Image (cartoon, rainbow, N blue to C red):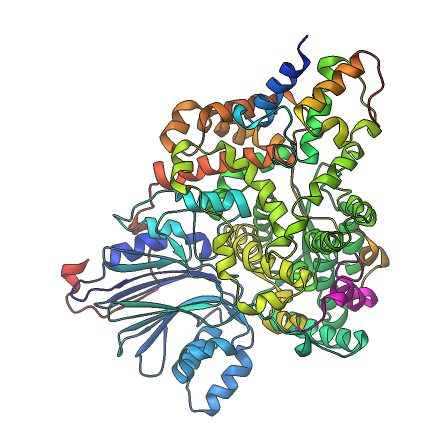
Amino acid sequence: MDVQQIMKDYIVDCILFGDGEKLQVSASLQENRILDSLGFLDIITFMEQRFGIKIDDDEVIPENFDTLGKMSQFVERKMNGRTAAR
Amino acid sequence: MCGIVGICDLKPGRRTNLHDIQRMMAQIRHRGPDQMGIYLDDIVGLGHLRLSIVDLQGGCQPIHNEDETLWIIYNGEVFNYIELKRELQEQGHRFYTTSDTEVLLHLYEQEGPRCLQRLNGQFALAIWDGVNKELFLARDRVGIRPLHYTIHNQRLIFASEIKSIFAVSGVPRAIDPVSLDQIFTFWTVLPGRTVFRDIHELPPGHYMKVSRGRVETKRYWEIPIYEREEQLEEPLETICEQVSDLLMDAIRVRLRADVPVGCYVSGGLDSSGVAAVAAKKLGVSWNTFGIRFDEEVFDEGTHQERMVSFLGSTHHQIQATPQRIGDAFAQTLWHCEKPLLRTSPVPLWLLSRVVHECGLKVVLTGEGADEVFGGYDIFKEAKVRQFWSRRPDSSLPALLLNQLYEDIFRDQRAKRLRQTFFRQGLDWSRDPLFSHTLRWDNTSRIKTFFSSEVKAATGTADPYEPVRQSLPQRFHQLDTVGKAQYLEMAIFLSNHLLSSQGDRVAMAHSVEIRLPFLDYRMIDLMARVPSRWKILGLNEKHLLKKVLRPLLPDQIVARRKQAYRAPIVHCLLAGASGELARGLLTGSAMRRAALFDIGKVDKLLAKLQAVENPSEIDGMALAGILSSQIIHQQFVEDYSPRGHSTIHPDLVIDRRTRVKAAV
């Protein structure tokens, strides 16, 4: 499963409504005004449902969520049962 | 309270067409169902629709001066007309009515445009000087009453509402992409603009003179700004006494009417304060009106009921269900005449209908207190972020911001991400727009839905530049809270709250709102009060709470401020509004309007159908897109004015020299 591609498709479709060129793997989603803190809640719900993971409150931090790359790595670590940054 | 319309020829030799004036009047019957009057000569045509409130028998307009050289049509109230009349009588002026309108006319005769400085009121007016062939238009200081105009075919065409201007044949109707861009940034257009190309609004605190083909606009009032040394030095208790006295007087003069006056009571501090001052200090027995919501997060019912039982008022409530909000969305837009990013005007439209059904024409409201006394979270947010910009390592601001937005950020999971959000732009703390850019930047994200045509028309121009350019020099002396207050008052209050949530939705049902907190004397006094007394720490409206505490139940003063909001997505995608959405958000309708990107809107709709709790920003996008499409349909695509024959005036003054040829 290509987690990064799934995450990217979700963000392009549901956050950017098709404007994919704005999205880069290592660019900050907040600094580039792609997401605000409420937008992240949509993404969290999507990640939990799509990948069958449970995200704890203290895992919702910039280290895990600030870029597409960090988010995808975070999901992969969770799916592999490894501990994510807190 | 009324509706006014008019046409003034800028090029002599043509004659005013009676049917044009009648057709303009026919579109805004709701503003003045009681009486109608028309004035015509070879240069101007004036039409008036009256909602009788003062001098029920004698106040039919147009009204003239002693020698019938000056004629006035007027929408509004001058609350200090009794005092002004006395003075004018001493100067020899004679009156044939007991209305405030006639007082205003004689004051103009006496003092010219300077008379505006002496009016305590809410008004939009037109005075025609038949001798000097000069038309004078003016609007109240903060923009409580509307006045729109356009220049077409060398004629100045003006009216309370835009739909009257469009009723004049040949006036082009098109959405202005720059205005749309402003609405999708600031939640409203900037002063002077409307969402329609070449249709303007006379900005608040301005007048216009039209004479011999020349049109000249001048500002007569500015939002007051006082330097530190001009601010009040008195102890807080003394200032509170002054505010208390002034508030009572502002309410007292606003109770002047020859019809009963009601009051909106939400359960919040401001409207409760107005109702309580009148009840406890002036002995008023109220008919009160309040909105209830099904959703707990929007509803203020507990506080509203507490207040009603405290006042002993006869209370009328409406339940603003998602169904009712959706059903009334399009009708509300017909009156607001501009796209909305929120549904909050709709419950107020429903509420004024109840007022009308109860037989009342006038209500007092608490609007304006948040701007004048420092009530909004954005003021506190600016204060905290300013502090943060000076001490970037402090953890206190993050804690305070979490507290501040508890209502909006109900999900606690994104706490630390939120800190990053509010940290944005801290290095811009010297920017005059520092307090608001975060909100505006965030709202601007919904511009992603604009069509390529709209994007091409707006280009890469900085949408904030017109705001920066409009700021007076003295603005830069204000502190952070003062600057934020100024921006709220200049942009959001005048162009949204007093319009889409004020005059337009109230007058839709022939109801006049009166706003004691926006008495110009109160605005001026509070501009002299240091910010620290307005927001003490993070306690909003500290001074106002202190003034009202002896008059209100403790729970009302102590309660957390709840912003007035209404649900969006569930209202707009169901019921009558859902039907409209299904029609207007399809490819063919969107292609005709050419305002939005069809593919992106489809993706938004798919997302909104799929998620249970849509985000605030997606809700705003839906409201903005759907309301723009509705406005386009109502005013551009399918506009069909009511005919002139529906107007049967009670009074016609016809001074045209070649009447028959003109009709």
Q: Is residue B568 magenta?
A: no
| Rendered location of residue B407, percent (x, y) | 75, 42
Q: Which quadrant holds residue B142? A: bottom right
Q: Residue at x 70, y 30 (%)?
A: A66
Residue B21 horizontal side relative to residue B304, left or right? left
How many labels sit on residues?
0
Residue B36 horizontal side relative to residue B130, left or right? right
| Rendered location of residue B496, percent (x, y) | 54, 52
Q: Residue at x 24, y 67 (%)?
A: B213
Q: Nearer the viewer, residue B359 or B88?
A: B88
User: What stretch of residues is rendered in magenta?
Assistant: B528-551
Above or below residue B14? Residue B298 is above
Q: Which quadrant holds residue B596? A: top left
Q: Residue at x 60, y 62 (%)?
A: B486
Query: Which image quarter holds the C terminus of chain A?
Result: top right
Q: Which quadrant holds residue B192? A: bottom left
Q: Residue furthest top?
A: A1
| Rendered location of residue B476, percent (x, y) | 59, 65
Residue B99 appearing in the image: no
Query: Which image quarter holds the N terminus of chain A?
Result: top right
Q: Nearer the viewer, residue B597 or A82?
A: A82
Q: Nearer the viewer, residue A20 or B410?
A: A20
Residue B172 horizontal side relative to residue B345, left or right? left
Residue B107 appearing in the image: yes
| Rendered location of residue B514, percent (x, y) | 59, 63
Q: Nearer the viewer, residue B433 or A39?
A: B433
